[in-house]
Image: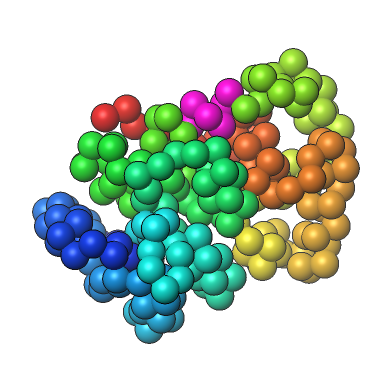
Amino acid sequence: MKRITVLLAEDHQIVREGLRKLLEADSNIEVVGEAATGRQAVALTNKLHPDVVVMDIAMPVLNGLEATRQIRQAFPDIKVIILSAHSDDAYVEEVMALGAAGFLIKQTSSHALATAIREVQKGNRFFSPSIARHLQNHYENSPNGAGLQKKKLDRLSSREAKVLQLIAEGQANKQVSAGLGISIKTVEKHRQHLMEKLSIHDTASLTRYAIAAGISERSVQVTIV
């Protein structure tokens, strides 16, 4: 069985060493590189092509969010898990918009990281429990909440619902295009129609909506640890 290759992007060496030792104890995971800055993370991703990048937000030279944006843009097949000491709403919003496959707060128990890596490699998304609750509460307490979700979902065509599912799984337009056998231009039109029908105006909100509505059976995996 092929091991999952991982790049660790964390500016504190002692934290990187701890993460490496933790992950090396898992026979299914291989740490293939370490980056101390966001710029190094982008360069090493280009060189090593890992399956998963574990990215701290607070990175020097190039912050983790911008590094994630560049990685996702250049390599949409590579999964990125955000690791942060903070779970502020603004961070969650941006991480969702970037298409990261997971978001773990550093207070989460250590073995959750290995679980997250395995899950995102399967195509799932993985969030710390507090982040998952934030995503759920956002829609339960908003005008697009649970009471309106089914009504709005009924407006979607089967193809639009499938595109929404793939967006919720963190796939970029290029991946959706390849998976469904349609042009990128058609994917963009479906995305536009989704936003119009659901009264949603950004990708992060589309993803939250799909998760809260349960439209993607693989959209969120959470382990309470």
Q: Which residues are magenta?
A: 132-137
Would you place residue 138 above or below residue 206 in this image? above
Q: Residue at x 40, y 30 (%)?
A: 129
Residue 140, x across and y down, in percent = 65, 20
Q: With 44 as the anchor, is 190 left or right in this view?
A: right
Q: With 56 as the anchor, is 184 left or right in this view?
A: right
Q: With 33 as the anchor, is 194 left or right in this view?
A: right
Kindly indicate the quadrant of the structure image that contains residue 143: top right
Q: Residue at x 79, y 40 (%)?
A: 200
Kindly indicate the quadrant of the structure image that contains residue 3: bottom left
Residue 82, x across and y down, in percent = 41, 52
Q: Nearer the viewer, residue 69 or 163?
A: 69
Q: With 137 as the anchor, is 20 left or right in this view?
A: left
Residue 124 visible to an observer of this rendering: no
Q: Residue at x 67, y 34 (%)?
A: 209
Q: Nearer the viewer, residue 22 or 86?
A: 86
Residue 205, x across and y down, in percent = 68, 41
